[in-house]
Amino acid sequence: MLPEELPPLPALTRAEGELVDRYLDVVDLLGRVNPARDADTYRALRAAQALVRKAEELRDALALMHRRGETEPHGETLARAMRVLDGERRTARLILPPGGPG
């Protein structure tokens, strides 16, 4: 049985595609650093070190969009792209895991 096909990515400019990719890179690294998740400190340290470079790449993608006059990103379209790229699962690692108070 073949796996279910993912929906196609929406049409994005190259800069929008770069923004989505770099944003999700940062999200992945932040998920590894999240102290509320099970992880060892060395893995979190390596992710935090890589986060600096990925944050710079995210900044550069946004600066490129701004220079090109892409000043109002189409949030709905970018959200669809992030969902196709498994963004919901990837961003879920940023929140606190379920649990009771204190």
Image (cartoon, rainbow, N blue to C red):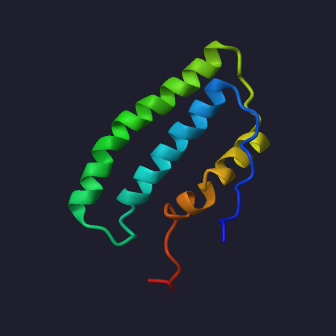
Q: Residue at x 42, y 30 (%)?
A: 56
- Image x and y of residue 36, in percent: 39, 70
Residue that lies at the very extreme toward the bottom in this rendered image: 100
Q: Compared with residue 16, is residue 37 higher up or lower down, i.e. above or below?
A: below
- Image x and y of residue 81, in percent: 69, 45
Q: Compared with residue 88, is residue 74 higher up or lower down, i.e. above or below?
A: above
**How many numbered callouts?**
0
Of 100 and 34, which appears nearest the observer?
Answer: 34
Residue that lies at the very extreme toward the front in this rendered image: 1
Indicate the quadrant containing the N terminus: top left, top right, bottom left or bottom right: bottom right
**Residue 74 in the figure: left or right of residue 24:** right
Q: Residue at x 68, y 53 (%)?
A: 83
- Image x and y of residue 43, in percent: 26, 58
Of 66 and 81, which appears nearest the observer?
Answer: 81
Q: Residue at x 41, y 37 (%)?
A: 54
Q: Residue at x 39, y 70 (%)?
A: 37
Give the image quarter of residue 52: top left
- Image x and y of residue 71, in percent: 71, 22
Indicate the quadrant containing the C terminus: top left, top right, bottom left or bottom right: bottom left
**Residue 8 in the figure: left or right of residue 51:** right
